[in-house]
Amino acid sequence: MEVKTVGVACDHAGFPMKQFVLQYLEKKGYPVKDYGTYSDESVDYPDFGHALGEGIESGEVYPGIGICGSGEGISMTLNKHQGVRAGLAWNKEIAHLIRQHNDANVLVLPGRFIDNKTAEAIMDEFFSASFEGGRHERRVKKIPLQK
């Protein structure tokens, strides 16, 4: 995956893991844009998911990482944005498949259900996997709503 600037967003439940993710990205040498939140004070995940989604849509960042408690709320929010393909991964096999088959451009982590070691393995896989194309490209092209 060619990395431009990694956009990162979370809610309060994902904040502890986001701190680890930011350290990981710095260690790997990736430029980062942090869309918040910036503490573990209770917030609404859509506010931060939409900010990251807009960053992906505009081309300001690519790829992205979203984190909330289960991963589901921020994933649902991100996937409302055209051009965003957010995939929730809880192990490295899923991380590989969301890149290889679905061309995911945002990795979503379930902050309350995985530990930092697992998150690191997932991110390693996500950043190293490539989109396979072929039959998967045809399917991915059908994802956006055409009005």
Image (cartoon, helix red, strand yellow):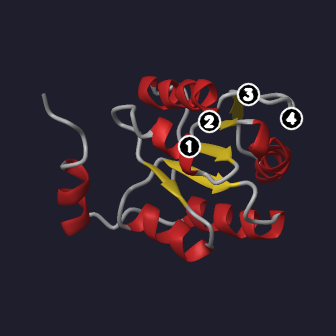
Q: Which mark is residue 73?
A: 1
The answer to whether mark 1 and mark 2 are in CB contact below 8 A is no
- Image: 52 above or below 29: above
Q: Earlier in the sequence, mark 1 or mark 2?
A: 2
How far, Cα to Cα, is label 3 from label 4? Answer: 8 Å
- Image: 76 above or below 146: below
Left or right, residue 10 beside residue 138 = right
Q: Report whether residue 3 is seen.
A: no
Q: Which residue is mark 4?
A: 40
Horizontal and vertical percent position of residue 30: 71, 44
Q: Which residue is mark 3?
A: 43
Please give the name of the residue rendered at 56% of the width and 52% of the height, measured from the top-left corner. Answer: 107
**Crowding at label 2, few (<14), some or many (≥20) Cα neighbours within 10 Å?**
some
User: Which circle, 1 or 2, is nearer the viewer?
Assistant: 1
Q: Which mark is residue 100?
A: none
Left or right, residue 101 beside residue 98 = left
